Amino acid sequence: MKRLVILGAGTGGTMMANHLYKKLEPEWKLTLLDQYPNHYYQPGFLFIPFGMYSEKDVVRPKRDFIPEGVEYVESTVDRIEPNTNQIRLESGATMSYDILIIATGSKSAPELTPGMLGEDWRKQIFDFYTIDGAIALHRALQDWNGGRLVIHLLELPVKCQVAPIEFTFLAEWWLTQHRLRERTELTYVTPLPRVSMKPSCSDTLEPVAKRKGITVVNGFKTERVDAPHHSIVSEEGKTVPYDLLVTIPIHTGDQAIARSGFGNRRHFVPTDPRTLQSKVNENVFVLGDATDVMTSKAGSVAHFESEVLTRNILHYIHGEPLEQSYDGHANCYIESGYNKAIFVDFGYDRQPAPEKYPLPHLGPLSGLEETHANHLGKLALRWIYWNVLLRGRKTSF
Ligand SMILES: Cc1cc2nc3c(=O)[nH]c(=O)nc-3n(C[C@H](O)[C@H](O)[C@H](O)COP(=O)(O)OP(=O)(O)OC[C@H]3O[C@@H](n4cnc5c(N)ncnc54)[C@H](O)[C@@H]3O)c2cc1C
């Protein structure tokens, strides 16, 4: 019997298990490996600080999404040994594979910024990219009475690179609803020269930020947090003071990738951007946030990648050439507050455009336009995620 191991039962790994179990021949055993029992719908973290969702709205047991016949092992991986086709577990046990799919995601690493975890952490500095951070920030906003609220993007890549500006737009809406807007100075700090990496997206978002009275600080390359003076400090010595700092910490791949010795400087796995075969070994493939490919780190990316990767795994098994067909496809909704959102759809070489996108279940969505329908699409995505996308059900979404 041959063994295909999927490492990571988050968004991408679960989608792959659901695609592959129907397609692999009986001589293949499919194993899914993950360290934690719970699956979080991470896009929902955005809404928790504003009280729109709570933890129970974004969590389900991982096992609910694992098809029968797929072996599920709950264990932490210490490292991968591609030369011997083995995975070493923290328990000391080993697991061998014939094909490996790495889907270990990305995570916040606040410890990589000097001063971040100092005396202001979770007192005046919060993140919303983790469930604990999102819940703690919700509590902090309940006590907010005005002052300098700074949203702070340190570097790319991070998961869902539009979530920081979405948070800023939602904060402006929430502050207005709570009669706190006039007492709050709202600032968005980014290392990028514009609000987004994509010019057409910046052309849409920057006027929205201006209309909302948000101060945008571009090109701010953070060196450290000066907690005693409640400010962030750039490499050039510029400072931005805060009363409440909502930070998006540096992201890295998993430490297991670092220990395996084949990740890049942030522990992302070198990956062919078109085939999703790793550059580590020909029987090792990668999808989702764990790759180093130059598109977003997003659930939509894992979804589009999973379709190409499923075909490429089958090509690899049958000794056929791999498809070079992944084009960096990503899409997402950008909440802009007041029950509206903007929809963007793009790829490696394709800018977001003002088109109409016919989506199953949702009807036409307007690209680069603030509409109520786009907001409803964002809210519907949670149901679609649990019931369609994660289960690998066919959709052209
Ligand atoms: C605030 C926020 C908003 C977002 N909004 C959007 C959005 O609007 N649209 C969108 O498309 N995406 C959005 N995303 C991004 C999306 O959630 C992620 O890109 C996606 O979930 C990544 O999937 P993945 O499979 O690569 O990683 P994950 O889903 O994170 O899964 C990785 C899995 O690997 C496991 N793992 C890691 N290391 C080990 C180890 N050593 N041993 C065992 N198991 C291990 C983990 O336990 C985890 O289950 C958002 C994310 C956040 C945080």
Image (spheres, helix red, strand yellow):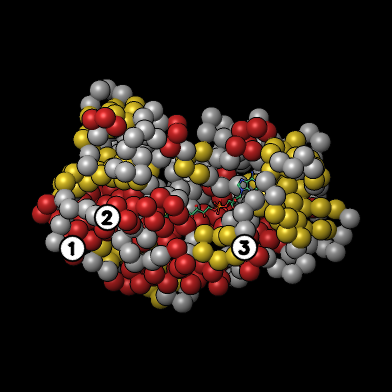
- Residue 395 visible from this viewpoint: no
Corner quadrant of residue 48:
bottom left
Q: Quick one: label 1, few (<14), some, or many (20+) residues within 10 Å?
A: few
Q: Are marks 1 and 3 in contact (CB under 8 Å)?
A: no
Q: Nearer the viewer, residue 341 or 154?
A: 154
Rendered view: 30 above or below 232: below
Residue shown at the point (61%, 41%) measured from the top left: 272
Picture coordinates of residue 182, whole percent (x, y)? 10, 54
Picture layout, residue 61 above or below residue 212: below
Left or right of 175, for residue 326:
right
Three-letter amino acid code of the residue under disc 1: His
Residue 141 numbered mark, or none: 2
- Mark 1 / mark 3, whichever is N-terminal: 3
Query: Which residue lies under the disc numbered 1?
Result: 178
Which amino acid type corresponds to the residue marked 3 in the rendered image? Lys
Circle 3 SS class: helix
The residue drawn where x is 34% and y is 49% is 164
Quick check: 357 left or right of 297?
left
Q: Which residue is mark 3?
A: 62
- Determine which quarter of the picture holds residue 243: top left
Please name the residue shown 75% across and 63% down the image.
70
Mark 1–mark 3 distance (CA, rounded to whole Å): 37 Å
Q: Is residue 311 left or right of residue 347?
A: right
- Is the CB of the residue bearing disc 3 within 8 angstroms of ligand 1? yes
38 vs 319, left or right, is: left
Q: Position of residue 43 (x, y in %)?
A: 44, 59
Specify few, some or many for label 3: CA neighbours under 10 Å numbering under 14, 14-19, or 20 or more. Answer: some
- Which of the image's four quarters has the N terminus? bottom right
Q: Amino acid at mark 2?
A: Leu
- Residue at (31%, 61%) from the top-left corner? 50
